[in-house]
Amino acid sequence: MKKCLLLVVFLCSSALSLQAQQVFDIVMDNASRTVNNPTSSFSQVKLAQFKKTALTYMRQQEAADSLIDFRVLDNQAFYLSQFITLYLKEFIKYSSAADGQQLSSVVKLFIKASLDCPMWNDPDIATTQAYVGDNEELTPFSLDTDWQKAYEEAQFLLKQFSAQ
């Protein structure tokens, strides 16, 4: 009976580990496919390239610890996608507005959310903020971001912005 129970526990834990990093891998695969697809638009490639870079950075930061927590990578990959989707929705919404100042304010709001929610507090600002200072980037966000907190912060800031 004891051996049977141990076998069941082992099989269940094996099944769980097979699914580890599933969200991360899906987001990475989709981003890679977009970057490598010759029919992808310039904007699609820029967005996908940022996702690939952010995901690669995340994996490197997690690998710096002796144990990689795949749940953290999955969670961060999910919220990275949510953050960018929300950003694009707001970007498109305010791009069509007559007042360009509103669009600039919304972009700054997302940049602030990204910068105010670091994940690893990496002192290498040249790397982590490589996308932030470049006005040509569609995704001007820090790589060192806790994407769940940044997503929640962006939603909060958007509510404040909309209430004005």
Image (cartoon, grey):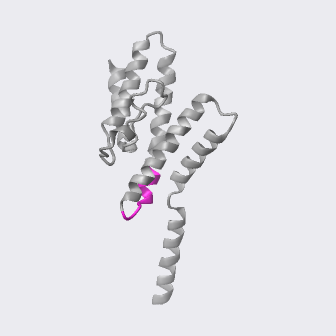
Locate residue 41 relative to residue 18 in the image: left or right: right
Residue in the picture at 50% in, 67% down: 17
Q: How many numbered dots are placed on residues in this image?
A: 0
Whole-percent x, y for residue 151 in the image:
39, 38
Residue furthest to the right in view is 39
Residue in the picture at 43% in, 33% down: 131
Whole-percent x, y for residue 12 in the image:
51, 73
Question: Foreground: 69 or 125?
Answer: 125
State whether residue 61 is above or below residue 136: below
Question: Foreground: 70 or 135?
Answer: 135
Q: Is residue 72 magenta?
A: yes
Dominant SS type (magenta): helix
Locate residue 72 relative to residue 42 in the image: left or right: left
Q: Quadrant of the C terminus?
A: top left
Start and end of the magenta stretch? 66-75
Q: Is residue 145 magenta?
A: no
Whole-percent x, y for residue 41 in the image:
64, 30
Residue furthest to the top in view is 98
Whole-percent x, y for residue 28 in the image:
55, 48
Question: Foreground: 100 or 97?
Answer: 100
Residue in the picture at 45% in, 59% down: 70
Question: Foreground: 100 or 55?
Answer: 55
